[in-house]
Image: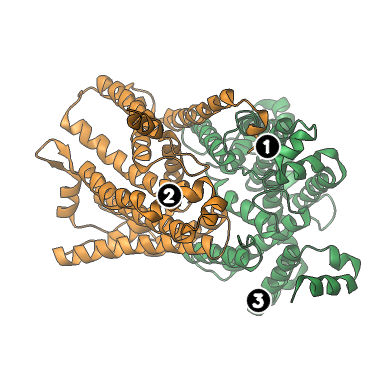
Amino acid sequence: MTDWRYWLAGQRGTLTALAIFVVMFAIYTANHPAGLTANVVQTAANKGVLLAFVAMAQTLVVITAGIDLSVGMIFILTNCLASWLVVGSPVETAFGVAVVLLAGLLCGMLNGAIVILGRLQPIVATIATGGAYFGLALLLRPSPGGSVNEDLADMLTGRILGVVPTSLVALAAVVLLVWVPFSRSVTGRAAYAVGSAEAAAYMSGMPIRRAKFMAYALSGLLAAVGGLFLTFFTYTGEAAYASGNAYTLFSIAAVVLGGVSLFGGRGSAIGAIFGAFAFRTIGDLLFVFDFDPLWQPLFQGVVLMIAVSFGAFALIRVRNRLEWFG
Amino acid sequence: MSETTMGRLAARMPKFVRRLDPAVATAFACIVLLLAVGSLYSTSFLSPEYLLQQLKVASFLGVIATGMMLVILLGQIDLSVPWVVSAGAMMACAAAAQGPLGLVLAIPFGVLCGVLLGLVNGVGVAYLRIPSMIVTLATNAVAQGLMVVYTGGFSPQDSASAAMRWLATGFLLPGVPNAVVVWAVVGAAMVFALTRTGFGRIVYAIGNRERAAYLSGVDTRRIVMVAFAVSGGLSAFGGVLLAGYASKAAQSMGDAYLLPAIAAVVLGGASILGGKGSYLGTVAGVILITLLQSILSVMQMPEAGRQITYGVVIVAMLLLYGRAPASR
């Protein structure tokens, strides 16, 4: 009887994110001139999936009470790399995909090594590595260009049976292949433990270094999956600094909307995915209401501000004022 | 070498050496090293003109890093720098276009806009207890949104007022650029505030442990809010100076200042966790970053190589002396 209550309490953040997304998407489709058609869903899914991958990447690190400000740059770097490699015959394409994913994994592993072995603060270390990753991206693509295996790209951005967007299926597959095994493994539980109380986790003999390292490495991998999909959608590679920064920022926004605690130890990548979809839908709401696109950044900023301010309601429940000062 | 021998060694050194933070000393050593490397490349690196020019370029970053340092000393961070810089510059230029009264009020108005954005940060961090990383990112997004709506997505046509241009490029003292004087004044004020006033003591106390500061009877939330407002104001002031230097404001003029500002403060030996750091260190960090950028551009390295070197060097220097103690 009480089992499902515990489960519900544990999933509250994720369920809230799901609710926000459902409400926002209902408003969006209700006011969309075309209504709820497979086309509208496909477009929304393709836009949302990119941010969802980057938000998942961010979640893994945030769970360990760290932050990865280089996810957006890994995303851009792998996009540029994919625009060179993911071309040609099926074998060449498969090789290219593998190399791109490996590159993302390596970027993540480098972040992890610097943060864990170098004992640097993640926020500073990842800002610096992010700069270096962007430099590499610029080296690969001084000007936008390149191409991608269009058969694969069209397959992964199209629809299955004319209804279900393939990108959503791919997202689900990544969740099943990466997030579910990780979160259920000893390493994954250790990542949560590190995030909620590092000293206690250390005292209990949990593999805290391995947990943190895996979190950063898989974060790089997931960002690379996002970069791969960006290439499939745009057919090109572009080293866009502003875009990398925006994805980093939006990934944090999606994580917060998705009920993942920035202090670590609480939340799930599923929540972050719904947070990402909700954030994207909110950004697109303006279009269906025929506002000038110029207002979009302001609108997104204000929504972000309101969303993060909701956290302040928790202050009311605090009995001892000292709890305010963490 | 054990702690005690280090201590005995240190006791024999002159007083000023003992008081010097090893991190700050390393930062200054890196500056000397950079100058030596640069002078191998070209002898003009050691000429007074070049060094003064570098100080002038450094002063914009210096003003912005001053605000960043105050916030980092609290154990917080201000990621709203990019668009607060741009907002300060754009609003100052916009005011300058509004006739004679606007010309007079251009600089204060630009700074005021920064203070207001900083206040939003401060209220969010201090009273709503939102992590500073989030609320400042949100403020950055709001500031960007406001500026995009105001400018229509293009760089504004208003140009900087004569006073702004004079402040950034003029010479009040012969040979010394005004921007350097401005940085010196801002820096001196910050040193005074941090070391000679109760405000400064409380800032360090909050950075070490906010609970303890609160229990000592300090209104810590008000101090945190004020610190963020000051940081916003200084970022905007940096923007005003930059607009004066380039004689107009541009959309993404602030983007290039967030990472260097944080890096300068951290390379100067301040702890990103708060409570530890000196202004001398920040000065060293700012000069270090500026010299590094200058040397990379003099070597005519392409943008890609510059970004990579820049990231690698910052990580390397942090590994040299910015490491946290081992958790054993």
Instruction: Please tell me the numbered disc located at residue B228.
Output: 1
Q: Quadrant of the C terminus of chain B?
A: bottom right
Three-letter code, disc 1? Phe
Mark 2 crowd level (few <14, some 14–19, many ≥20, 10 Å Cα): many
Three-letter code, disc 3? Val
Marks 2/3 in contact by CB < 8 Å: the verdict is no
- Image quadrant of residue A95? bottom left
Front-lying residue, B109 or A202: A202
Front-lying residue, A297 or A317: A317
Answer with mark 3 or mark 1, whichever residue precedes in sequence. Answer: 3
Q: Quadrant of the N terminus of chain B?
A: bottom right
- Image quadrant of residue B113? top right
Instruction: Name chain B's colour.
Output: green
Give the structural element (helix, strand or loop) at label 1.
Answer: helix
Residue ID at (38%, 41%): A268
What percent of the width, then of the height, locates residue B12?
Answer: 90, 74
What percent of the width, then of the height, locates residue A213?
Answer: 44, 60
Chain holding disc 2: A
Tell me the distance, in whole angstroms, between the alpha carbons under discs 2 and 3: 33 Å
Front-lying residue, B49 or A117: A117
Q: Is residue A64 visible?
A: no
Instruction: Name chain A's colour.
Output: orange
Tell me the distance, in whole angstroms, between the alpha carbons under discs 3 and 1: 38 Å
Q: Where does label 3 land, which residue?
A: B37
B326 up-or-down from A122: above or below: below
